[in-house]
Amino acid sequence: MTSFEFHPAKPEQKRLILKWLARPHVTEWLHGDGYRNTIVSLDGFLSGRTADPAHWIAYLDGRPIAYLITSRVDPTDERYAAVAFAGDTGVSIDVFIGDTADTGHGHGTALIRAFLAQCLPDASDAVIDPEASNARAVHVYRKVGFRIVDTFIAPWHPVPHFLMHTPLTGGLPTPSPAWAQIETLLSGFERILAGTLAGVYVHGSLAFGCFNPASSDIDLLVVTERRITPSEKRALVEELLGVSLSPHPVEISFLAASDIAPWRHPAPYDLHFSEDWRERYRKALSDGSWAGWSSPAGTDDDLAAHIVVTRETGLTLHGRPPVLVLPEVPYEDVAASIRSDLAWAIDRAAENPVYLVLNACRASAFFTERKILSKRDGARWALGSMPTEFHDAIRAAARLYDGGGVAENGAMRAGPENAVEIAKYVLARA
């Protein structure tokens, strides 16, 4: 039976720590300001000038194996607003397995559990903040008991990071409602599709960091190694029917790897779910017609754009990063996908002019500069790049998207022709 021990780092171990931090499996995730901040903190601790953050060496059966950093957390700090702390003695943790030969053996999960029990007996909570694309680390932390409660852009490395939390006084963490839904779905997918699940990715507003709880969908893409069977589809649909709208709507496509490589447009999908499909799925489950569900189930013009956005900004929940799983999509197919979506939205301008205006803005950014932007950033870009006569409508749409008041909503719905004019302007130059 393996045994872990943990002791504060000593000055004579600095060379060992620096050697570990130079390993490729560490430098992939610790670099730039994050690395520099770590070294400054380490020097302060080893010299005795500072006690917090604290730096530790983990030993496996007496052999140094990992480097850990802990820091006290102020539960009132706005950075942790999404965390439902169990008490007022929270601690943040960073963990680095030292040598590459010691990775991939399950040490991480056991090591962290032992550290929490041995070295943080009085802490009420632990938080950890891996890069969202570090799927291996996220998987380990979930096994320990951490749950994703938020996403943020880190000042030390401006890419999406997960904020993960676990209480240390009993019970389970309370993530935001959106992430609670995602955790439930991910557990279901891992159970139903065990052995064939290749990747699960968040895209859309959650990945871009502009999720609006009042109006946003949870957007997911799932890739499987093979096509899924009718009975698996039934189980997935039952899961989705139970989770979507509790409280946020879910939109998700399941893609078989063999159906998207080699790439073709429009791309086939194996299963799709959104609230528009709820009633037809309920009927199929009731009358037994689910047994005749085919694979692939159909094709979708939108998938070209969704895949490009996911490759660029998607958050990995399971499997390898999206750029290693999802195919490259030619510009012409992405452009066709965006044009199709705008044409669809023009026909529904009276129902949702905000969607049309903001998607037209980011479509223009893609067509003119090949930029992949969120709706919010697309509006900002458009205010500096599109004709001034559109600016009032763009500002109104952006304010409404961010939860603006009745005035903007009334103005938008009274004049959907403004939204259509903007979209047609973009399409004419696509």
Image (tube, helix red, strand yellow):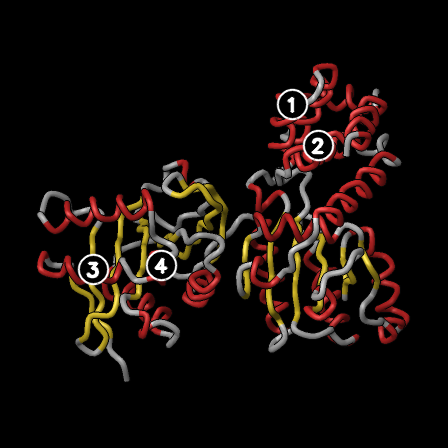
Q: Nearer the viewer's eye, disc 2 or disc 3?
A: 2
Q: What distance separates the C-alpha of mark 3 from that of mark 1?
A: 49 Å
Q: What distance separates the C-alpha of mark 4 from that of mark 1?
A: 50 Å
Of mark 1 and mark 2, the one earlier in the sequence is 2
Which amino acid, mark 3? Ile
In this picture, is 287 found above or below 244?
Answer: below
Picture quadrant where residue 103 is located: bottom left
The answer to which of 254 and 22 lies nearer the viewer is: 22
Q: Secondary structure at mark 4?
A: loop
Q: Secondary structure at mark 1?
A: helix
- Asked if the residues shown at circle 1 and circle 2 are in contact, with their CB atoms under 8 angstroms apart, the answer is yes
The answer to which of 310 and 88 lies nearer the viewer is: 310
Residue 365 image point, x, y percent: 66, 33
In this picture, is 49 found above or below 398?
Answer: below
Does residue 93 appear to the left or right of 244 in the view shown?
A: left
Q: What distance separates the C-alpha of mark 1 from that of mark 2?
A: 9 Å
Residue 244 image point, x, y percent: 70, 54
The residue carrying pointer 2 sits among few (fewer than 14), some (14 to 19) or many (20 or more) residues within 10 Å by Cα, namely many
Residue 352 image point, x, y percent: 80, 33
Residue at point 66%, 27% (across, down): 398
Which residue, given by chain and number where applicable, does mark 4 sit on?
168
Q: What distance separates the C-alpha of mark 4 from that of mark 2?
A: 48 Å
Which residue, given by chain and number where applicable, does mark 2 sit on?
364
Which residue, given by chain and number where applicable, does mark 3 sit on?
17
Picture quadrant where residue 61 is located: bottom left
Q: Secondary structure at mark 2?
A: helix
Which residue, given by chain and number where applicable, does mark 1 sit on?
385
Of mark 3 and mark 4, the one earlier in the sequence is 3
